[in-house]
Amino acid sequence: MATETLTIGKALNLGLRRAMEDDAKVVLMGEDIGRLGGVFRITDGLQKDFGEDRVVDTPLAEAGILGTAVGLAMRGYRPVCEIQFDGFVFPAYNQIVTQVAKIHARSRGRLPMPIVIRIPFGGGIGAVEHHSESPEAYFAHTPGLKVVAVSNPVDAYWGIQQAIAHPDPIVFLEPKRRYWEKAPVDREATPDPLFASRVVRGGDDVTVLAYGPMVKTALQAAEAAAEEGRSLEVVDLRTVSPLDLDPVFDSVRRTGRCVVVHEAPVTLGLGAEIAARVTESCFHSLEAPVLRVGGYDTPYPPSKLEEEYLPDLDRVLDAVDRALQF
Amino acid sequence: MSVSSATTEVVDPVPGAGAPHLPQQPDLVQLLTPEGERVEHPDYAVDVSAEELRGLYRDLALVRRWDVEATALQRQGELGIWASLLGQEAAQIGAGRAMADTDTAFPTYREHGVAWTRGVDPLHVISLFRGVDNGGWDPVATRFNLYTVVIGAQTLHATGYAMGLQRDGAESATLAFLGDGATSQGEVNEAMIWAASFSAPVVFFCQNNQYAISVPLERQSRVPLYRRAAGFGFPGVRVDGNDVLAVLAVTRAALAAARDGQGPTFIEAFTYRMGAHTTSDDPTRYRLASELEEWKLRDPIARVKAYLSRSGAADAGFFAGVEAEADELAARIRRGTVEMPDPPGTAMFDQVYAEQTPPLAAQQAEFEAYQASFAGGGH
C-alpha cells in the first residue's frame, strides 16, 4: 500500500532506510544511534539491517562526528550525522561553520560536502537545559550551509531523502515535540522540491509564516481565527536557508499583513530577515508592519516556564489582532 | 651533541614547582647527526642510495630558497602574510617523501615542503598568501589537501578520510600534520580517539617547533608530546625533526603499519621554527637569541651537505647545480607572484554551493550589474 499513516519519527526512519538502500555510500553516524536506535529511536532497526559500518555508534564527541564526516565526504561517502539534541551541536559548531560550510568553495568545487546534520530542535518536551534550543539562525547566517526545518511526516519522509541526495551540506532540523504527530504519507508520490515554501492553508486577511514545530501552532491559530471570522493564510517555509519568499510575497501582496512565528529568540532571528525582505518587496501592499512572534531573548527557560516562553496560538492571534488594528 | 640512542628520562614535575622542564636532548630517533655523521638506530634502519640522498638535499635546498623568497616578497608588500618553514625543512621533506603516491596529506598552513613533495606548484601556495584564492592546487589530484588555518581541524578530516580508505579496502593511509600547539585542541584529541577506536590508517605527524606563535611548549604539555599517544592506545615516536633520514624512516614505518591495518601512530618531530610564526610576529619578544644560535647548529640542511661531501656522494658541481636551480626557482616565484592576476570579482560567488541558491544568484546578478555600471562610465 503506497499510502500509510506515519508519525514524523517513523517517516524519518523509513526515509533514512530508503536512502541507505538507494545509495551504499550513505553512512549514519552519531551517539547511540546503533543498538539503541537513537534517543528518539529515529534510527531504530537500521544498524541491525545495515550493519555497524553503515550505522556507526561513535565516540561521545560532536566535533569528532562532524570532522570525520568531512573526511568521509572527501572520500566519496554521504555521511548523515545525528546530533542528539540541539544544545549539543555547539562542540561541533567549529567543524560545521569553518569546515563543512566552506570546503566546497575553498576547493573551488573539487571537494563536495554532501553531509546531512540531523538535529532534533526546539522545545516543548519538558526537558532539562540544553535540550530545547533553536539554533537555526546561526547556521542560516553561514554561507555554504543550507538549513531545512520540516513540520510534518510527508516532508520528513521525502525531505530526509532529498537532503541526503543533495550535493551541499544541509542542517536538517527535526521538530522534536512533533515527532509523534501523524499524517498519511504516500510513499510513491512525487515529492515537492526541498527548498520550496508552501501555502498550507489559504486565507485573505493575514499571512502567517512558520516552519518546523510552529507550523502546527500557526494552523491552530488559523483554525481559531476562522471561528471569529478571520481568514489567515499559513505558509510553511520548509527551508530556512535559502529562503523561498516569492510565494510569501504573493500572499502578502494579497493580504497586506504578515506575521512571522518561530521559537527562537526574536532579536536577529529568522523573523528579522523575513520582515526586512517582505518590507523591501511588498512595501506598497503592506497595511501594517511585519510582526514577529518568537521566544524571548532569554536562555531557554526551565521546563516549568516553557509554556510561557514558547509562542502558542494565543500569542499568534494577538499578533494577528495587532496587525489588523493598523 | 651526540644524541644517538641515549635515553633521557623526564622527571615528572613537582606540582607548584613552576613550569615543567622539558629535556633539551630528548630520546629521539636519529640517523644523521648534526655533524653529518651517519648513525644507526635499532628500530629504524633505512637504506638510502646516494642518488636518493642527493634528491633529499635538493628538496631541502629548494624549499628553503622558496621560503626565503616568499618571506622577501612579503616584506616587499607582494604577499599579505607568509608562514615560514625555516628550520622545519627536514621534518617536511622527510615526511612528504615517506608517503606513497596513493597516500593523502592533510596539512596545516606551513607544510610548503610537503606540498613540494606532492608536486604542488609553489605559486599555488603563494596565491593563498597573496590573497588571490584559498589555495590554487587540486587537492584530489595531488593528494595534498588544502591548507587548514583553524588549528587542528584537519586531523579529524584525515581520520575520517582514513576511515573511508579502510571501508574501501584501499591499501593507503593518511598523514595528518599538526603543530605542538594543536595538541591542546579538543578536536585533535577527538581525532586520536576516533583513530584508535576505529583503528584508522592515519599517522599523526606533529612538528614540535617549540612555540605556538609565542607560547612555549611548556604551556601546552607537562609530558613530551609523543608520550600522549600511549594514553590513546597507539605508538608514539619522537624523531629528530632536523634529520631528514630519520624522519623519512620513522614516517615510512608508521605509514606502512597503518596501511597494514595496524592503526595509527603519533610522530613527534622534534624541531625548531627558526623564523617567526608568520611575518606578522616578532620572535625577539618571546625567545632568546642564544636559543636560536643553539638550534642553528642543528640546521637540517647543513648536516646532509656535510654527509654528502664527506661520503663523496656529491661534489662541488652538484651543490653548485642545486644552487643554480634554486636561483631559477626563486626567480620564477618572484616573477609569477608579481605577475599573478587578481581574481575576477564574481569568483566569490562561484562554488559557494554545488547547487547555487536563488537568493545568492540574485546577489551575484546585482553585483555584476553594479560592476557593469562603472564600465566606460568615467570612474
Image: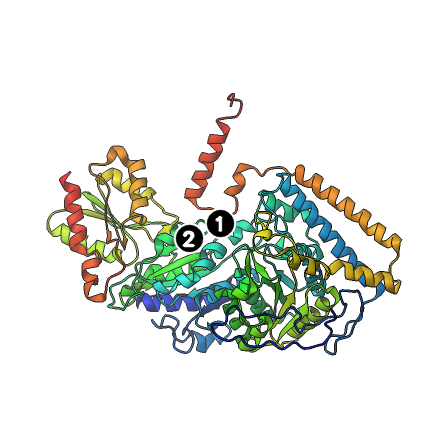
Quadrant where the N terminus of chain B lies?
bottom right
Residue under pointer 1: B353
In the rendered image, residue B279, in percent from the top left (x then y), is placed at: 60, 47
Q: Which of the pair B164/B276 is nearer the observer?
A: B276
- The numbered disc on residue B120 is none
Pointer 1 chain = B
User: Are circles 1 and 2 on residues that touch, CB within 8 Å?
Assistant: yes
In the image shown, does B265 or B76 lie closer to the viewer? Answer: B76
Chain ID for label 2? A
Q: Residue furthest left?
A: A228
Q: Answer few, some or many: residues within 10 Å of disc 1's Cα (few below 14, many 20 plus, some between 14 and 19).
A: many
Q: Percent position (x, y) of residue B284?
A: 60, 52
- Dot 2 amino acid type: Lys
* Total numbered labels placed on residues in the image: 2
Q: Residue at x 72, y 77 (%)?
A: B43
Q: Do badges 1 and 2 share one subunit? A: no
In terms of secondary structure, where does tag 2 sit?
strand
Horizontal side of B250 relative to A115 (left or right) equals right
Note whether B37 is above or below A323 in the view shown.
Answer: below
**In the visual, does B254 lie left or right of A278?**
right
- Residue A279: image location, x then y, percent: 28, 38
The 10 Å Cα crowd at callout 2, few under 14, some 14 to 19, many 20 or more, is many
SS for dot 1: loop
Could you tell me the amino acid type at mark 1?
Tyr
Taking depth in this image into account, of A164 and A303 the one nearest to the observer is A303
Q: Is residue A193 visible?
A: no
> In this rendering, would B185 be left or right of A155?
right
Q: Which residue is mark 2?
A: A146
Q: CA distance from mark 1 to mark 2?
A: 9 Å
